[in-house]
């Protein structure tokens, strides 16, 4: 029996995820890789809408307005808070978090097109307090900006959700995965 709920596309590797992160650019690949390196299994999976909206979002001072301490950190709740702020004109959360520019970057990629996919997210098993939310299985290790923007467009009804790919680092094993 498969220990993973999401449809597994195929087995992946730490090296493939590293290459993916380097190709995306940005500056926190080292932290992301360190965080997933202790997990023994890597997969490329397809996330349903429910799985996507149940991803656990980061929590730090820069996003406290949308992921406050003691509140639901699943992407659905965080995106709903972000939409309220966005629609009220409060878009500057911190130096690294501007809802307007995050939203604009997504729209440049035409999320309305059939078969739209974000660059694959990088997820890891949720742990500790990240697991306290019903349906929370994965923590977004890389891709919070793009996941948030896409979730906002889905929740607002601008687009119909299309399944998204994600690299997952996990302690679980997938019996359904070719090359297990």
Image (cartoon, rainbow, N blue to C red):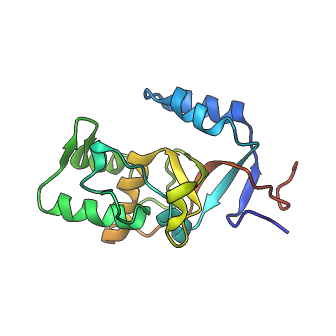
Q: Residue at the left extreme?
A: 89
Q: Residue at x 73, y 63 (%)?
A: 4
How many numbered callouts?
0
Name the image quarter holding the N terminus: bottom right
Left or right, 116 with reference to 40: left
Q: Nearer the viewer, residue 148 or 106?
A: 148
Q: Nearer the viewer, residue 110 or 106?
A: 106
Q: Residue at x 39, y 57 (%)?
A: 150
* Image coordinates for residue 172, horizontal then vertical, percent: 75, 55
Q: Up-down: is 48 above or below 21? A: below
Q: Nearer the viewer, residue 6 or 140?
A: 140
Using the rendered image of the protein, determine whether residue 98 is visible from the camera's viewpoint: yes
Residue 131 picture quarter: bottom right
Q: Residue at x 43, y 54 (%)?
A: 57
* Image coordinates for residue 74, horizontal then vertical, percent: 44, 63
Q: Up-down: is 13 above or below 9? A: above
Q: Residue at x 35, y 69 (%)?
A: 155
Q: Up-down: is 12 above or below 75? A: above
Using the rendered image of the protein, determine whether residue 162 is visible from the camera's viewpoint: no
Left or right, 107 with reference to 49: left
Left or right, 47 with reference to 151: right
Left or right, 9 with reference to 161: right
* Image coordinates for residue 115, horizontal then vertical, percent: 53, 59
* Image coordinates for residue 162, horizontal then vertical, percent: 51, 64
Q: Up-down: is 136 above or below 180? A: below
């Amino acid at each position: 029996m498969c220990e993973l709920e999401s449809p597994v596309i195929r087995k992946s590797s730490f090296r493939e995820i590293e290459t993916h992160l380097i190709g995306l650019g940005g500056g926190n690949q080292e932290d992301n890789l360190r965080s997933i390196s202790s997990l023994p299994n890597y997969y490329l999976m397809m996330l349903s809408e429910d799985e996507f909206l149940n991803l656990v979002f980061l929590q730090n001072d820069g996003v406290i307005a949308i992921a406050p301490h003691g509140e639901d950190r699943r992407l659905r709740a965080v995106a709903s808070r972000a939409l309220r702020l966005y629609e009220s004109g409060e878009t500057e959360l911190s130096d690294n978090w501007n809802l307007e520019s995050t939203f604009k970057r997504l729209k440049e990629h035409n999320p309305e097109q059939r078969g739209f996919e974000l660059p694959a997210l990088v997820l890891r098993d949720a742990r500790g307090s990240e697991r306290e939310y019903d349906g929370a299985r994965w923590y977004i290790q890389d891709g919070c900006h793009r996941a948030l923007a896409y979730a906002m467009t889905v929740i607002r009804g601008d687009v119909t959700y299309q399944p998204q790919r994600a690299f997952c680092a996990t302690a679980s094993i997938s019996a359904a995965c070719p090359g297990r």
